[in-house]
Amino acid sequence: MAETISSPASAARVAAFFDLDKTIIASSSALAFSKPLLRQGLISRRAALKSAYAQLVFSLSGADEDRTERMRAEISALCTGWDVAQVRAIVNETLHDIVDPLVYAEAAELIASHKERGHDVIVLSAAGEEVVSPIAAMLGATRSVATRMEIVDGRYSGQVEFYCYGEQKAVAAKQLAADHGYDLTASFAYTDSSTDVPMLEVVGHPFAVNPDRALRRVAIEREWPVLTFSNPVSLRSRIPSPSPTAFAVGVVGIGAMAAAGVTWYGLARRKRSANSA
């Protein structure tokens, strides 16, 4: 169940920062796109099958810092040269069907509760802008910050402009506070991952949601509340879909960084096999 939120006594602007994967949605937003990428020829059938196993590993063990850094490097190499318009079209056409059933009811209720109290809701995610922005729009979030990849002549260059991960989430939260006048001591943050401890540390009200083992230990040590979200429901049944124009505007950024995560396990396994040969 989502915990009841008490309004801060001060009149300062308050933000609620949410991680995306396994906090708002019951999966990895990157690994969820294997089928449409396969249909469009951006990944192979073998890579798509590998992604199913990667999804299982992600759900059971979480994405620790070392694994996520390796994934970032693999994705950067993989997506170099991908046509941005094609990736955006894939996300545009499939996002609602793929992500809609994965949203935790508890997360949707918590977001609505924050909004009722006049808090700004912000999604901070290591996934790509192309996926994060429209999901945030569907949820009614005030804004989002996600990973951005460099685009040159309509294609991904393979260079990451901003990796919204780990300490960088805390940096983003502080920058948003400076830009929009948020009182971080009165603000909230929610995440499942120990890699997001820096983000939790910058707010006055940190929450661990479905925490991995490392984050659970930290939460117990620091007496942070632990929430359990376990009920994915259709987002369409809870929140009206945005207009086509709003959705199109939201679908910008780096589809490759989010979508190509489906292939990480296969690529890493091939590399290990080659090294051992």
Image (cartoon, rainbow, N blue to C red):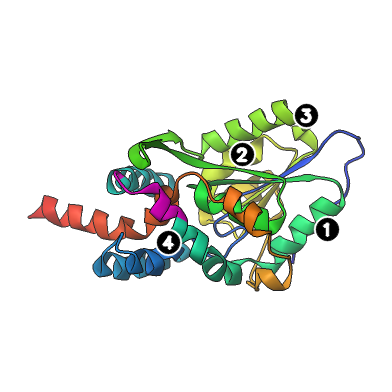
Residue 47 occupies which quadrant of the picture?
Answer: bottom left
> Can you see residue 170?
yes
Query: On screen, 144 above or below 277?
Result: above
Q: Quickly name the residue at label 1.
A: 4
Q: Amino acid at mark 3?
A: Gly
How far from the left and from the top, in percent, is residue 110? 76, 58
At numbered mark 4, what does the secondary structure look like: helix, strand or loop? Answer: helix
How far from the left and from the top, in percent, is residue 92? 51, 59
How far from the left and from the top, in percent, is residue 3? 78, 59
At numbered mark 1, what does the secondary structure look like: helix, strand or loop? Answer: loop
Judged by depth in the image, the label closer to the viewer, 1 or 3, is: 3
Left or right position of 255 against 206: left
Q: Amino acid at mark 1?
A: Thr
Mark 4 and mark 1 lie on one chain; the one further toward the N terminus is 1
* Magenta region: 80-88
Q: Quickly name the residue at label 3.
A: 181
Q: Residue at x 88, y 46 (%)?
A: 7
Other residues around mark 3 within 10 Å, as few (<14) / some (14–19) / many (≥20): few
Q: Quickly name the residue at label 4.
A: 31
Mark 2 and mark 3 lie on one chain; the one further toward the N terminus is 3
246 or 208: nearer the viewer: 246
Q: Quadrant of the C terminus?
A: bottom left
Other residues around mark 4 within 10 Å, as few (<14) / some (14–19) / many (≥20): many
At numbered mark 2, what does the secondary structure look like: helix, strand or loop? Answer: helix
Q: Quickly name the residue at label 2.
A: 199
